Amino acid sequence: FDGTPTPPFLNTTPHPRHVRQHFYADVRHATLKAIEDGARRAVVRSVFPEMNTETDVYRVGTLLEMARDLTTAVAQDGKRVKLCVQQSLGKGVFQGLPLSLSGVRKIMEKMEWEEGLVEDGFVRFGSVGEDQVEDDDDVFVILCPQNMQGAALLPLLQAMDEKAGERPIVLINPDLTDIPSSGNVMQVRGRQERMEFVANFKDIYHFRLLYKKPFLYPIYGALRMTYGEPWTVYKRVQKSRKEEDYFPVGSFDKEPSTSEITSCILGR
């Protein structure tokens, strides 16, 4: 799929290595360009099958490989990167982590990193909060930050954001929607302020497959946006059992609505 935005046969899992490398490079190029252009609060959303926590083929190794690839590229550009995974939230028996992040920090620290990056402090590991921000940190990358039932991550992220100042913060596959819980956690009070804070983080990369929900098969197409380019809807066309391709059928200045995407796919 030389240079095309969407590799074929994404329902084939585990993905071949070249498919993963395609998405790693796509995210890397978009993020480096955004940081170079001065982006300060950024969102990367890459939800191909192995990165989709709603599927049974979700692979935490793919998330960590993408994070390593991106972090290494930023560090090689001479910047010191803090790679963060949120800590356990909540109290007592309700304390814990989202299932998709369980054990991720430990695995991340034991991964093989390019020689010198960790040892010389160009890549460091952390959690979420103002105490994680050090004076010589240049860029912060946070993996899959999300609220939990009974515990809000946003106050910690807001404090971290304030202390980071003008330094870039990149969120990978965040889910910062409210989960209203007892004890006045994420209730109506303060919701507008929380929504305004989340809106400060702008999309610099987006990729997701298009299905007829609630099903995850078949794939009808894909939606992709990379920094500096429009949102593009692609339609999947299967030419034979061994050949398929994705063709652009719509372009938008902002994320298209469900009805706009449907109209593009159906050719209305």
Image (tube, rainbow, N blue to C red):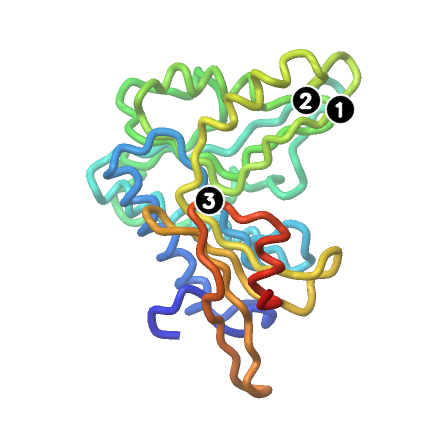
**Residue at 62% across, 51% down:** 258
Q: Is residue 17 above or below residue 89?
A: below
Tell me where residue 145 sits by quadrant.
top right
User: Which of 2/55 is in front?
Assistant: 2
Tell me which numbered mark, 3 or 1, is placed earlier along the sequence: 1
Answer left or right for 38 relative to 99.
Answer: left
Residue 69 visible within the image? no
Q: State the separation of the CA atoms marked 1 and 2.
A: 9 Å
Tell me where residue 140 sits by quadrant.
top left
**Residue at 53% across, 49% down:** 256
Answer left or right for 97 relative to 5.
Answer: right
**Numbered tag placed on residue 94 in the rendering:** 1
Tell me where residue 131 sits by quadrant.
top left
Percent across and percent down for residue 107 are 51, 44
**Residue at disc 1, secondary structure:** helix
Percent across and percent down for residue 205 are 42, 47
User: Which of 97/268 is in front?
Assistant: 268
Percent across and percent down for residue 268 are 60, 65
Percent across and percent down for residue 240 are 57, 87
Tell me which numbered mark, 3 or 2, is placed earlier along the sequence: 2
**Residue at disc 2, secondary structure:** loop
**Numbered tag placed on residue 254 in the rendering:** 3
The three-letter code of the residue at mark 3 reads Lys
Per the image, the residue denoted by label 2 is 151
Q: State the separation of the CA atoms marked 3 and 2.
A: 32 Å
**Residue at 54% across, 37% down:** 174
Q: Residue furthest left?
A: 78
**Residue at disc 3, secondary structure:** loop
- Foreground: disc 1 or disc 2: 2
Q: State the separation of the CA atoms marked 3 and 1.
A: 39 Å
Answer left or right for 207 relative to 31.
Answer: right
